[in-house]
Image (tube, helix red, strand yellow):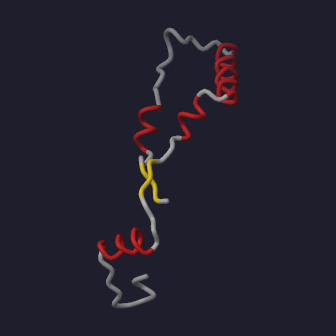
Amino acid sequence: LYERFPGLDISLSCLWRLLTQDCSFSLKQQASLYNEERNAERTLRLRHEVVSKWKEIGVDFQNNCVFIDEAGFNTHMIMGRAWS
């Protein structure tokens, strides 16, 4: 906007007022798709397929694997709120 309209000056409070009052936007709690998909039939099937392939090639789960739980990392990377 600044390139197309030289000299344009927009304050954060003006933008906030426009979004919340004039456009009726509000911040809502965002639903997490991760939790819904985590135990879906497709996800469980894919997990089983991966583990089966690892067993076939001789992966030693007890001695040569490090498992990293992505749940906390991914959950905290997503904003908890979204505009609606």
Nearest the camera: 72 or 67? 72
> Which quadrant is the N terminus positioned in?
bottom left
Nearest the camera: 51 or 44? 44
Say which residue appears at 65% left-offset and 29% top-offset: 40
* Picture layout, residue 23 above or below residue 65: below
Q: Residue furthest top?
A: 62
Nearest the camera: 84 or 73? 84
Residue 18 image offset from top left, x and y in percent: 39, 75
* Picture layout, residue 18 above or below residue 50: below
Residue 54 image offset from top left, x and y in percent: 64, 18
Residue 77 image offset from top left, x and y in percent: 42, 44
Q: Residue furthest bottom?
A: 6
Query: Does residue 28 appear to the left or right of 40 in the view shown?
Result: left
Residue 8 image offset from top left, x and y in percent: 35, 87
Say which residue appears at 50% left-offset and 17% top-offset: 65
* Picture layout, residue 57 above or below residue 15: above
- Number of on-image labels: 0
Say which residue appears at 60% left-offset and 27% top-offset: 39
